[in-house]
Image (spheres, rainbow, N blue to C red):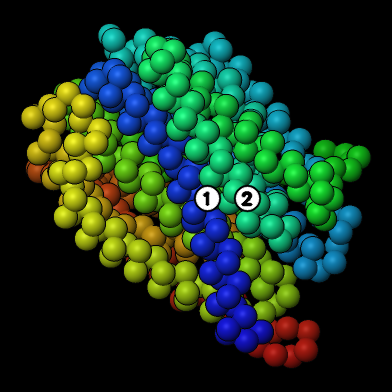
Amino acid sequence: MNKHYVLKNFFKYVSLNVIGMIGLSCYILADTFFVSNALGSNGLAALNFSIPIYCIINGLGLMIGIGGATKYSILKSQNEDEKANSIFSNTVIVGIVIGIIMSIVGIFLSTTIAKLLGAEGATLTMSSTYLTTILCFSPFFILNNIMLAFIRNDGNPRLSMVAMLIGSFSNIVLDYIFIFPFSMGMFGAAFATGLAPIISLCILSSHFIKQKNNFKLIKCKINIKIIINILGLGLSAFITEISSGIVLIIFNLVILDITGVVGVAAYGIVANVALVVVSIFTGISQGIQPLISEGYGKNDSILMKQVLKYAITLSLCIATIIYILTFLLSYNIIAIFNSENNVELIPIAINGLRIYFTGFFFAGPNIIIAAFLSATTRMKSAFVVSIMRGCIAIIPILLLLTAFLGMNGVWLSFTFAEIITTITATIFLSKLKPKVQNNGEIMNY
């Protein structure tokens, strides 16, 4: 496979997926903008307490969807059509079951969860309302991620992008309508977000209506071994997504002790803008997954090496551009979400943006390497890289640095954790041993 063809496919899948993921990330960014303008710093803090649960829902959808789509892509490249359809059927079943469980949790445990996340007083009521609504829409969030992943792997990344963008745009429009003209407050923000994946699914249905689908639901037994394999392949995507949620929970609790609700609101701005940046790198990693899985299925080491090289180079270029823009426009970014013009919030948030965003020079490659390891069925290595940046490295570093540096320690902990993860990820890549193919040629991965 020549480099021109690989590069063309790389930019096709990655560009469409990055655009779509930016659109998806705007779900929460739109909520942040409208809630901050309508409900002020308390509303912003309440939303920040709630976002980790959204990250978990989205992470579950990504784990199930990407895990299933990865296995599907490998089997299709090996002409195992019946097994591929079985993978899709099992993926849909497990997605629906987990979605229903999350909905039940939302109905009965939202207030308890909000308290555990740090909400109290006025923020508790708003957080509980947001969580109940979002969790009830869990089946649609999860099914949307499943369909996006399978349709992307079925050779239609453009439709996946369109569905993500239209879903996101509808969320922004509905956010405005529900929060301002209808005065529905926090419930309106959550309801608009919950309707977005339903609209996206309606767009994705055209793949089946036009009979472009190469996969379909078939009657098959629930196979626990297949489900475990699906969840294992998608685990790194899950960890990557919920790492943002885990960091939010821990950071919120630590910041409450340092600067109170104003600090949480400032971190809310930084974290929500950061979610958009993470979505770009996630978009790259999801964009390369079909190509890497195809290369793995066909034992094409050249394809895999080229795609990995292009992805890491692109992530470093994007990180550089984002950091320069963030540094120069930090005050303007904060002003968008600071409707009350809280003077205490401004310096905290500006300092946070400028320090926290240095971590993306390392976060981008980490997310991509984890996706590469997962797409080549190296589940344990992918899990270690993902869990390292999600929990293992950042939590002890956060507690250590904040003890000496206060809020600066909060911002720096993200960067230090990503650096440690990069070292770990590089070690895993260097240990990939060559395998011998059936024709006797050496395969590097």
- Most extreme residue toward the bottom is 440
Residue 131: x, y in percent? 46, 20
The front one of 415 and 168 is: 168
* Residue displayed at 30% across by 15% down: 123
* Residue displayed at 78% across by 42% down: 90
Q: Quadrant of the C terminus?
A: bottom right
Residue carrying label 2: 160
* Residue displayed at 62% across by 80% down: 5
- Most extreme residue toward the right is 219
The front one of 441 and 162 is: 162
- Tell me the SS state at disc 2: helix
Location of residue 240 with respect to 261 vertically, above or below: below
Label pair 2/1, CB-CB below 8 angstroms: yes
Classify residue 4 by image quadrant. Answer: bottom right
Residue 99: x, y in percent? 64, 28
Decide which of tag 2 and tag 1 comes sooner along the chain.
Answer: 1
Residue carrying label 1: 20
Circle 1: residue type: Gly
Task: Say whether residue 91 is left or right of residue 174.
Answer: right
Circle 2: residue type: Ser
